[in-house]
Image: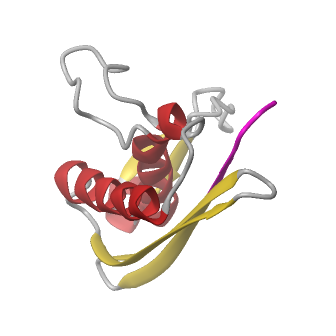
Amino acid sequence: MAKITDKFRYSDLDFNFAKSASNDVARKFDNNAIKQSLKNLLLTNFYERPFRPSLGANLISRLFDSFTEGDVSEIREDVIEVIQSFEPRVTLRSVLVDFNEVSETLTIEVEYSFLDNEDTLDLQIERVK
Protein backbone atom coordinates (compact mmCIF):
# COMPACT_ATOMS: atom_id res chain seq x y z
CA MET A 1 0.00 0.00 0.00
CA ALA A 2 1.39 3.38 -0.99
CA LYS A 3 1.83 6.05 1.60
CA ILE A 4 -0.02 9.31 1.14
CA THR A 5 3.33 11.06 0.94
CA ASP A 6 4.28 8.83 -2.01
CA LYS A 7 1.20 9.78 -4.03
CA PHE A 8 0.86 13.48 -3.23
CA ARG A 9 3.42 16.22 -3.16
CA TYR A 10 1.42 18.97 -1.38
CA SER A 11 -1.19 18.71 1.35
CA ASP A 12 -3.04 21.08 3.63
CA LEU A 13 -5.92 20.97 6.08
CA ASP A 14 -9.40 21.33 4.61
CA PHE A 15 -10.61 24.70 5.89
CA ASN A 16 -14.20 23.42 5.89
CA PHE A 17 -13.04 21.11 8.70
CA ALA A 18 -14.84 18.12 7.24
CA LYS A 19 -14.12 14.81 8.91
CA SER A 20 -12.07 12.17 7.17
CA ALA A 21 -12.78 8.43 7.34
CA SER A 22 -10.55 8.27 10.43
CA ASN A 23 -12.61 11.01 12.19
CA ASP A 24 -9.69 13.38 11.83
CA VAL A 25 -9.76 16.72 10.03
CA ALA A 26 -9.76 16.05 6.30
CA ARG A 27 -6.88 17.19 4.13
CA LYS A 28 -6.64 18.58 0.64
CA PHE A 29 -3.91 17.42 -1.69
CA ASP A 30 -1.92 18.81 -4.60
CA ASN A 31 -4.06 21.06 -6.83
CA ASN A 32 -6.90 21.31 -4.31
CA ALA A 33 -4.46 22.39 -1.59
CA ILE A 34 -2.88 24.98 -3.87
CA LYS A 35 -6.24 26.31 -5.02
CA GLN A 36 -7.35 26.66 -1.38
CA SER A 37 -4.11 28.47 -0.56
CA LEU A 38 -4.53 30.92 -3.44
CA LYS A 39 -8.13 31.65 -2.47
CA ASN A 40 -7.08 32.18 1.14
CA LEU A 41 -4.35 34.62 0.09
CA LEU A 42 -6.72 36.62 -2.09
CA LEU A 43 -9.45 36.83 0.55
CA THR A 44 -7.10 37.92 3.34
CA ASN A 45 -6.96 41.64 4.13
CA PHE A 46 -3.86 43.41 5.35
CA TYR A 47 -3.26 43.22 9.12
CA GLU A 48 -5.52 40.16 9.56
CA ARG A 49 -2.58 37.88 10.30
CA PRO A 50 -0.53 38.56 13.41
CA PHE A 51 3.11 39.36 12.64
CA ARG A 52 2.39 39.29 8.85
CA PRO A 53 0.67 42.64 8.14
CA SER A 54 1.39 42.60 4.41
CA LEU A 55 0.01 39.11 3.81
CA GLY A 56 -3.05 39.14 1.57
CA ALA A 57 -4.44 40.98 -1.43
CA ASN A 58 -6.68 43.33 0.60
CA LEU A 59 -9.57 42.80 -1.85
CA ILE A 60 -12.50 42.78 0.55
CA SER A 61 -11.53 46.11 2.10
CA ARG A 62 -11.52 47.66 -1.39
CA LEU A 63 -14.97 46.42 -2.39
CA PHE A 64 -16.71 49.60 -1.31
CA ASP A 65 -14.45 51.90 -3.29
CA SER A 66 -15.61 53.45 -6.54
CA PHE A 67 -13.71 51.52 -9.18
CA THR A 68 -11.95 53.08 -12.14
CA GLU A 69 -9.83 51.33 -14.77
CA GLY A 70 -6.77 52.33 -12.76
CA ASP A 71 -8.15 50.69 -9.63
CA VAL A 72 -8.86 47.45 -11.48
CA SER A 73 -5.31 47.49 -12.86
CA GLU A 74 -3.94 48.13 -9.35
CA ILE A 75 -5.95 45.21 -7.95
CA ARG A 76 -4.53 42.99 -10.68
CA GLU A 77 -0.98 44.02 -9.72
CA ASP A 78 -1.76 43.37 -6.03
CA VAL A 79 -3.03 39.87 -6.86
CA ILE A 80 0.11 39.12 -8.87
CA GLU A 81 2.36 40.43 -6.11
CA VAL A 82 0.73 38.47 -3.29
CA ILE A 83 0.80 35.21 -5.26
CA GLN A 84 4.42 35.64 -6.29
CA SER A 85 5.43 36.61 -2.75
CA PHE A 86 3.53 34.04 -0.71
CA GLU A 87 2.80 31.06 -2.97
CA PRO A 88 6.11 29.91 -4.46
CA ARG A 89 4.67 26.55 -5.56
CA VAL A 90 2.86 28.09 -8.54
CA THR A 91 3.89 29.82 -11.73
CA LEU A 92 1.42 32.46 -12.85
CA ARG A 93 0.21 32.28 -16.43
CA SER A 94 -2.26 35.18 -16.36
CA VAL A 95 -4.42 37.24 -14.02
CA LEU A 96 -7.66 38.85 -15.20
CA VAL A 97 -9.62 41.26 -13.01
CA ASP A 98 -12.99 42.76 -13.87
CA PHE A 99 -15.53 44.82 -11.95
CA ASN A 100 -19.17 44.66 -13.02
CA GLU A 101 -20.85 47.91 -11.95
CA VAL A 102 -24.38 46.57 -12.41
CA SER A 103 -24.02 43.53 -10.14
CA GLU A 104 -21.24 45.19 -8.11
CA THR A 105 -19.12 42.06 -8.42
CA LEU A 106 -15.35 41.85 -8.57
CA THR A 107 -14.26 38.86 -10.67
CA ILE A 108 -10.74 37.50 -10.57
CA GLU A 109 -9.41 34.72 -12.78
CA VAL A 110 -5.97 33.35 -12.02
CA GLU A 111 -4.39 30.91 -14.47
CA TYR A 112 -1.43 29.11 -12.96
CA SER A 113 0.68 26.00 -13.22
CA PHE A 114 2.44 23.85 -10.68
CA LEU A 115 4.60 20.84 -11.36
CA ASP A 116 3.17 19.64 -14.71
CA ASN A 117 -0.42 20.74 -14.05
CA GLU A 118 -2.26 23.83 -15.22
CA ASP A 119 -5.44 25.13 -13.62
CA THR A 120 -7.59 28.22 -13.13
CA LEU A 121 -8.94 29.78 -9.96
CA ASP A 122 -12.14 31.77 -10.50
CA LEU A 123 -13.14 34.03 -7.63
CA GLN A 124 -16.10 36.39 -7.40
CA ILE A 125 -16.50 38.87 -4.58
CA GLU A 126 -19.80 40.66 -4.35
CA ARG A 127 -20.81 43.76 -2.43
CA VAL A 128 -23.50 43.11 0.14
CA LYS A 129 -26.02 45.87 0.49
Is residue 28 shown in magenta? no
Residue at the top extreme of this rendering: 50
The image quadrant that residue 53 belongs to is top left
The image quadrant that residue 57 belongs to is top left
In the picture shown, does residue 48 fall above or below 56?
Answer: above
Give coordinates of residue 54: x percent, y percent: 22, 32
Q: Is residue 38 left or right of residue 91?
A: right
In the picture shown, does residue 19 fall above or below 107?
Answer: above
Specify whether residue 20 is in view: yes
**Quarter the C terminus occupies:** top right
Give coordinates of residue 82: x percent, y percent: 27, 50
Q: Residue at x 50, y 49 (%)?
A: 39
- Which residue occupies the foreground of this view, 77 or 84? 77
The image quadrant that residue 15 belongs to is top right
Q: Is residue 112 left or right of residue 88?
A: right
Q: Residue at x 29, y 78 (%)?
A: 115
Q: Residue at x 49, y 31 (%)?
A: 61
Give coordinates of residue 75: x percent, y percent: 40, 55
Q: Count the labels in the image.
A: 0
- Which residue occupies the foreground of this view, 125 or 3? 125
Is residue 128 shown in magenta? yes
Question: Which stretch appears magenta?
Answer: 124-129
Give coordinates of residue 9: x percent, y percent: 32, 62
Specify whether residue 3 is in view: no
- Which residue occupies the foreground of this view, 114 or 3? 114
